[in-house]
Amino acid sequence: MKDLTEDQIERAAKLKGMGTSRKRVEDVRFTQGKGNYVDDIKLDGMLFGDFVRSPYAHARVKSINIEEAMKVPGVVAVLTAKDLEPLSLHWMPTLAGDKQMVLADGKVLFQGQEVAFVVASDRYAAADAVELVEVDYEELPVIVNPFEALKSDVVLREDIKDETSGAHGPRNHHNHIFTWTEGNEAATEQAIDSAEVVAEEMVYYHRTHPCPLETCGTVASMDKVTGKLTVWGTFQAPHVVRTVASLLSGIEEHNIRVISPDIGGGFGNKVGVYPGYICAIVASIVTGKPVKWIEDRMDNLMATAFARDYWMKGRISATKDGKITGLHCHVTADHGAFDACADPTKFPAGFFHICTGSYDIPAAFVKVDGVYTNKAPGGVAYRCSFRVTEAAYFIERMIEVLAIELNMDAAELRRINFIRADQFPYQSALGWEYDSGDYHTAWDKALKAVDYEGLRKEQAQRIEDFKAGKTRKLLGIGLTHFTEIVGAGPVKNCDILGMGMFDSCEIRIHPTGSAIARLGTISQGQAHATTFAQILATETGIPADSITIEEGDTDTAPYGLGTYGSRSTPVAGAATALAGRKIRAKAQMIAAYLLEVHDDDVEWDVDRFSVKGAPERFKTMKEIAYAAYNQAIPGLEPGLEAVSYYDPPNMTYPFGAYICVMEVDVDTGQWDIRQFYALDDCGTRINPMVIDGQVHGGVTEALAIAMGQEIAYDDMGNVKTGTLMDFFLPTAWEVPNYTTDHTVTPSPHHPIGAKGVGESPNVGGVPAFSNAVHDAFRAFGLRQSHMPHDHWRIWKIASDLGLHA
Ligand code: PCD
């Protein structure tokens, strides 16, 4: 590393490159109400589509009468499965290799299922007509519990009732979807059988929902003159939508243009394909007019992608001094009516097998059974890459339960079992290669920052005071050390519907030295326009303020797999750095020519190439860009552009240490978060301020999930939490102050050493909050209690433990 002189430091600062807390450039329009969201799109003659949805969770559809609905002024069409059938679009393939009804075909399988699509001149006419579509239902028995589903005679999916195998292998019951296993079962059983200590627990991670502020929606416009279909939508993966739309409709891919405009939060909700997209496209083709479909809040909560709903039965074994020897996990996964989980094809349980967490566990085995029930389909990674949050919650609860069994401090138990820094790259018992980590350093830093020992002393005193009747509030210390796995591909083992998971960046430097770069990803609020320009600023010496970042238009952006699974930085970020390096390589040749020296005699110096040993002789990137277009350089094409497609060699493994200090009121069940400390290690940090924002948002979603957010059903399959009156969305009122911190362990295989971070705070936050609740009651005998820990449930814990006597 060469010394940076004052002058170089000043020049580097002007670039606002990597490591700078550059202000989010997109916020200028977001905070002034100048964003351009799908619902802002208004086209001439545009129609509006709305769904008739099933009030029943399981019923036969005997007839649909659209006569009265068609009489409503402005109504143009009412589509039912019968209309879609000739086009073979009444069912659609799901991301998980199953198929899903677009519109009810003979029966309905969950409350809120799409039954008919009304197309009218405006939203109000459509809503009026929806009320007038008469559907004759015959109710069928409802199953909302996956364990009962596996015993029941009731066949949910009559369309596949005789099929003994599905997309992921054999099915052993008509309501069973797949069994998926990983690890060495015999070795794990042996480790557990011969262990000195074994802890066993059922850990349930309840059904919840990403609930972005903007619901899902689309505008489809078929231009019959040009034959071109344009689809605007809230898509987290616009290129995938284009390819799938082409394969399904037979329209050639160059005739489909998919545009994701500004997106008001995704959180996994906008990865899946929903009937609304198909119906809007079909309606536009049929009517020859643009058709818009925008969900309302209830539609969004009841019918689009839920998250979690994992029943995780665990056994963990250890020596009596706390060295873990084995981990066994059997998951019963409630997938709802259709298996529409958004996971890479080979992984029906996502990356759940990262469930050995941050610990060096010699033997492990995981088995996941997917099950159909009468609930909405679409298991998505609500701010966690593919079931990683379930995995982290599971192991972090099992560690706490084991600590109880061992009568040991849970921080110490973690420390004894962490994978050591010298063990990386680390091969886990469940098949992952962790690229890098330094858990002990992070853990010690975290414990010190919160004065862990002091907290434990305070807690002990509190327990004494409680027993002496001096207080009714207990103190919980929620510990978590999580390991994430983000950045899917590589292509060789990660694909979605057969499309390999790489990503891309294309950059054009303009003659005057500013630039535009386009990527295959799509920001939903993450600030890509800010941060990707910073990577390029450092790599090319062009100030970030002079670089436009554009995403989301398949006619202009290079092909990419989109943004979810915190993959943009690990994959597209790598492509961006490499595209920048290609620019620099050509710039070097141009500079050498202009400076009349050999290519090897110039060196990169922040924003310029200078002659080695003679730094006063240089050409800035700005000068080089101008020359690239305006000066004939022998042997070189004019122009300065590059494109890079990046297939990552491995995923990245960010990690973190989170600690939550919580007071709980035994009599009211109310909780108060006194302190929340979040240490994240996402390798090289591009924009510390954006990372802080990601952590604040992610921990807030974790707070929501752990402390109240839930999609709850009654026995009839009615959704009890279909509005924001019942579905907990935290506001500034509930959100505590967060303290953020970091260590930096660069990814060894990423060009700039960066790992993803967007989902880490959710993955680490949920167990930290939940462990705090559990820890508050540990001294009184609590082992395991299901989330969400709302006031009533916390009160109930206290009641069950006899603390109200
Ligand atoms: N970064 C930095 N550094 C580092 C890393 C990172 O700076 N090292 C930054 C970047 O650049 C960006 C951010 O941060 O800007 C993020 O990143 P990432 O991690 O890579 O991620 P992405 O891919 O971009 O994104 C995604 C994520 C997810 S996945 C989710 S859910 C969520 C998160 O993101 N979502 C959201 N966050 C957020 N934010 C907002 N605002 N919004 C939204 O929606 Mo999934 O799978 O879908 O479930």
Image (cartoon, rainbow, N blue to C red):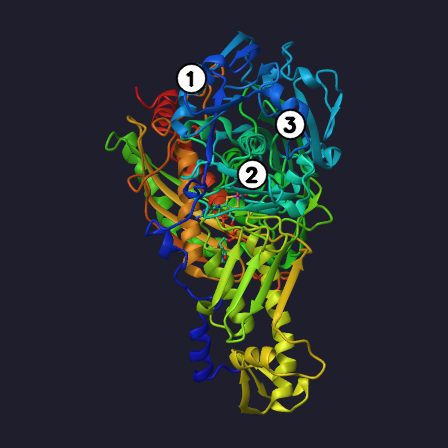
Left or right, residue 226 beside residue 36:
right
- Residue 144: x, y in percent? 54, 17
Secondary-structure class at tag 1:
helix
- Residue 439: x, y in percent? 54, 54
Furthest residue to the front?
A: 225
- Residue 570: x, y in percent? 59, 55
Furthest residue to the left?
A: 470
Residue 437 appears in the picture as rendered: no
Left or right, residue 75 beside residue 349:
left
Q: Nearer the viewer, mark 2 or mark 3?
A: 3
Secondary-structure class at tag 3:
loop
Residue linked to disc 3 = 89
Contact between labelled residues 2 and 1, with CB atoms less than 8 Å apart:
no
Question: In this view of the protein, which residue sits in the foreground, 495 or 450?
Answer: 495
Q: CA distance from mark 1 to mark 2?
A: 48 Å
Q: CA distance from mark 1 to mark 3?
A: 24 Å
Residue linked to disc 2 = 395
